[in-house]
Amino acid sequence: MKKYNAAAMWCHLGAFAGIIFPFGNFLVPLILWLARRHEDELVDDQGKESLNFQISVFLYGIASGILVFLIVGIFLLIALFFFTIVQVIKASLSASEGKPYRYPLCIRFIK
């Protein structure tokens, strides 16, 4: 695996840091992206993609949390959890091969 592919892959896998410490899912990809974005196009592209996805998931989580009062939010939160895990793994595998990945349902805040 080439060095830049590893950095792009870790921009995605860094999202799992949110399991260990609060806002780690934002901070790890942000730090990796800011540190390596000028070195390689793939890291720049995938770092932004990872951050955009994490922001989108956060917003979807807030909306689902509000809908918990209508019961449907519980199912949405569970689905969002599994959707996020699957998509982050798919993105990490794609980035490790040097291919850019586009998350579905991702709002692109950072261009």
Image (cartoon, rainbow, N blue to C red):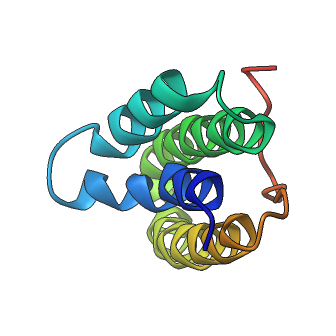
Point 60% across, 79% down: residue: 86
Image location (x, y in percent) of residue 8: 61, 52
> In the figure, residue 26 lies in which quadrant?
top left
Quarter of the picture containing the N terminus is: bottom right
For the view shown, which residue lies furthest in the left direction?
21
**Residue 23 appears left or right of 58:** left
Point 70% across, 32% down: residue: 44
The vertical placement of 96 against 23, above or below, is: below
For the view shown, which residue lies furthest in the front direction?
2
The vertical placement of 7 against 55, above or below, is: below
* Along the line of sight, the residue nearer the viewer: 43 or 3: 3
Point 54% across, 43% down: residue: 54
> In the figure, residue 33 lies in which quadrant?
top right
The vertical placement of 44 against 68, above or below, is: above
* Along the line of sight, the residue nearer the viewer: 25 or 57: 25
> In the figure, residue 80 lies in which quadrant?
bottom right
**Residue 52 appears left or right of 63:** right
Quarter of the picture containing the C terminus is: top right
**Residue 70 appears left or right of 94:** left
* Along the line of sight, the residue nearer the viewer: 74 or 80: 80
Image location (x, y in percent) of residue 13: 46, 62
Point 80% across, 30% down: residue: 108
